[in-house]
């Protein structure tokens, strides 16, 4: 996952997710690696294709504003799993979803399940039916809002 806006016009923005497909090391010898020998990465992003990321220099103010510090780094965060919150707005082919006792908000299971294109790629772990249904099968506020919205016909399309 990118942790910085690299190229906004091209979709390389903070939060975009992908898979590292190749690492390009600065030298292929068995020589000493130096601090500035940071590899380039080839990443296949979910929606924008394959891109090669090179380390960039980021400047920070030094302690007590006595100059600046420059750090060369790849502004990515390695992820093996995503939270339901992070997946809002994304669509995936496969997912392993934990529907156990860790569910803590109304609609959380729905958001997780609705990210999938089909049920073929779904794997549910730790299913706790009481957490899914609880004492009230639905959120009362959501039901009232749906009833209110049904009173108004949809606007005609242009």
Image: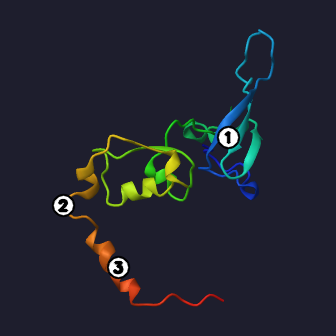
Between the C-alphas of marks 3 and 1, the distance is 49 Å
Q: Image quadrant of residue 26?
A: top right
At 60% from the left edge and 43% from the top edge, which residue is drawn? 1
Question: Does 30 sit above or below residue 83?
Answer: above
Q: Which mark is residue 59?
A: 1
Q: Secondary structure at mark 2?
A: loop
Mark 2 or mark 1: whose residue is earlier in sequence: 1
Q: Position of residue 39 (x, y in %)?
A: 74, 27
Q: Which mark is residue 137?
A: none
Which residue appears at 54% of the width and 37% of the height? Answer: 79
First in sequence: mark 2 vs mark 3 = 2
Q: Is residue 136 left or right of residue 75?
A: left
Which quadrant: the C terminus?
Answer: bottom right
Q: Which mark is residue 145?
A: 3
Is residue 144 in view from this perspective? Answer: yes
Looking at the image, residue 28 lies above or below residue 73 = above
The furthest residue to the front: 120
The residue labelled by disc 2 is 135
Left or right for 86, reference 66:
left
Mark earlier in primary sequence (3, 1):
1
């Amino acid at each position: 996952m990118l942790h910085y806006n690299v190229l906004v016009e091209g979709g390389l923005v903070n939060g975009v997710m992908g898979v590292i497909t190749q690492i390009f090391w600065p030298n292929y010898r068995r020589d000493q690696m130096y601090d500035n020998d940071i590899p380039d990465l080839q990443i296949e992003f979910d929606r924008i294709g394959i891109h090669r990321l090179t380390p960039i220099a980021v400047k920070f103010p030094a302690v007590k504003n006595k100059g600046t510090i420059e750090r060369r780094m790849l502004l990515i965060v390695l992820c093996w799993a995503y939270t339901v919150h992070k997946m809002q707005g994304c669509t995936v082919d496969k997912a392993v979803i934990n529907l156990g006792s860790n569910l803590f908000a109304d609609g959380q299971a729905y958001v997780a399940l609705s990210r999938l294109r089909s049920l073929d790629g779904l794997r549910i772990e730790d299913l706790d039916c009481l957490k899914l249904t609880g004492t009230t099968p639905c959120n009362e506020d959501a039901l009232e809002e749906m009833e209110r919205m049904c009173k108004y016909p949809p606007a005609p399309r242009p």
